[in-house]
Structure formats: structure tokens, C-alpha cells
Amino acid sequence: MGPPKIFDRGLLRGRLARAMTRGAPDFLMARAADDLLDRLLTVKREFPRSLDLGSPSAHFAQAVAASGRAPPLRASGCGGDVIIDEEAPPFAPNAFDLIVSGMALQWVNDLPGALAQVRRMLAPDGLFIACLVGGASLIELRFALAQAEEEIAGGASPRVSPFVDVRDMGALLQRAGFALPVADVDSFTLRYDSMFALMDDLRAMGAANVLAKRARKPLRRDVVTRAARIYAERFSDADGRVRASFEIIWASGWAPHESQQKPAQRGSATTRLEDAMKSSRKSDA
């Protein structure tokens, strides 16, 4: 039995392809690409074979090139050099020295499996850096829609996709076999004229609801109107504009290699903690 089908990936690919064709708003990808460039500039390594896995635009490929490396192969389900399924990439083991991924892996149905595939494709001492939309994103929109639908329709349907929590990413990287795993988060708030302006941006980015078990009926107009009122009442500033929380989770890890620093084995210490504390107290006296 395979992983549960959380997202309708066919619907997602179609929406992302249309969004890219129409010139989707790119402020999230641009912000993430700037962060990726900063991270790559701290790594003093050449990566002759690199892959941009799933990123819906060229921002991440451009960041790799701006760091002084060769541009990566772009592979995704909605464009690039190669059209692939990010959940089952067709590349050989040890095929790449660097794999980056921007705003794509939050929509795979089996994130542990996708990370294991990335680990398989990395050569020893290869680096993986990815960012995903985090679970604290759009908490205001979730609340307003759920509250309005509960009030008017007597129950809420899933309207906003669930995303991974930063606290889980380190464990997922370790489970996939990465060495030196790191997970961190970039949290920020954007402001909009109204909830409707936020939803327009999400639709233009191809990021509207793609849950496999999403409600079959569209939101009723009275529910949307009530949600906008709740949003404005609960999450607006003095100037009337509303806040929208976003969270970008960063994950990185290396394919294991004998040259990498390793933690000391348990029980290998030559000095007891108690003795060290006694010595420290004597020095302070």
C-alpha cells in the first residue's frame, strides 16, 4: 500500500504551468533565491553536476549560476530542461554533486520518499539544499475560512493545504540518510489590501487549493464575504490592510562521505562529566 494521496498533483502541474505562462507573482521565489545564493556562497566547494529539482521557475537555477557554479539541469513537472515527476525522478544513483529545490517538495505526497530519492541521486559528499512552504503559512486565511464556513454552513472543509513543520524536517533528513542535516525557518509577514487580494495572488501563483480531498463545491459567496470580514476584524492593522503570515522552511544535508566530521561515539569520552565539573569549580575558586 502506497502513501496516502494528499495532493492532486495533476491539478497542481496544470495550475503551475498556466501560472508560469501568465507571469505569476515571483516575490516568494525571488526571496528564496536570494537566500539560496547566500547559502551557496558560504560553501567553498565546486559542484560540477547539479540539479534543480521541481522549482517552478528559473530563480534557483539562476542563484546557482550566480554563485559561480555551472547552471544546473532544471527538472520539474511543469517546465524546465526535463519534464519529470518529482516523486519518482528518473536519474541514476550518484548522478549529482548538488541538488537544489525551491518551493516544490511541500506538494509531494510522500516527502520521506522524495528525500530518500534525493539522497540516492547525490554522489558521496554531495549537497542538498531545499526550501518548502512551512506549516505556519497563511494561518490567518485558514482561520477566517474555517470560522466563516462553520458559522454559515455548519462545518468546515479543507481549503488550505497542510505543510510540514520545521521541527520535523531534521528528523526527516536523518531518516533519508543525510549527514550533517540542518533545518531552519524564515518567517515573515506580508500585507494586503484585503483577503481577496491575498487570494488573487495565491491563484495567480498556481497555489490555490490542490488537496485531493478538497471540497467538491466551491466556497459559497456568503461564506467568502463573512471570511473576509473575520479576516479584517482579527488580522488588520490601523491602516486597514490585513496581514498574511508566511514561513519558508530550509533543509540541507550532505551525502555521507568519510571526510566529513562525525560525532563521537557514545561512551568514548576519556573524562567523566563529574570530574570535569570538579576541575572547573577548583579553577573558579
Image (cartoon, grey):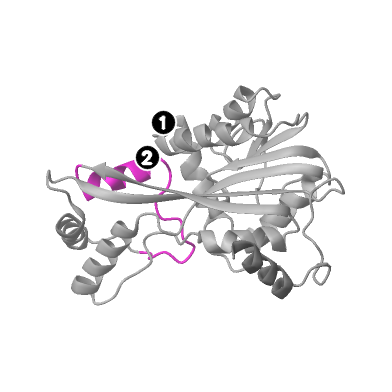
Q: Is residue 203 magenta?
A: yes
Callout 1, which amino acid? Answer: Arg
Q: Nearer the viewer, residue 142 or 191?
A: 191
Mark 2 vs 1: CB contact within 8 A: yes
254 sits to left or right of 267: left
Cα distance in 3D space between marks 2 and 1: 8 Å
Name the mark on residue 22.
Answer: 1
Q: Nearer the viewer, residue 184 or 12?
A: 184
Q: Position of residue 283 (x, y in %)?
A: 64, 62
Residue at (48%, 59%) from the top-left corner?
163
Question: How crowded is the residue under tag 2: few (<14 C-alpha within 10 Å), some, or many (20+)?
Answer: many
Q: Nearer the viewer, residue 219 or 40?
A: 40
Determine the secondary structure under disc 2: helix
Question: How crowded is the residue under tag 1: few (<14 C-alpha within 10 Å), some, or many (20+)?
Answer: few
Q: Is any atom of residue 271 visible in this view? A: yes
Q: Position of residue 261 (x, y in %)?
A: 79, 50
Residue at (57%, 31%) from the top-left corner?
37
In the rendered structure, which disc, 2 or 1, sits on the residue that comes first in sequence?
1
Q: Position of residue 36 (x, y in %)?
A: 56, 36
- Magenta stretch: give its range: 193-216
Question: For residue 202, what is the image quadrant?
Answer: top left
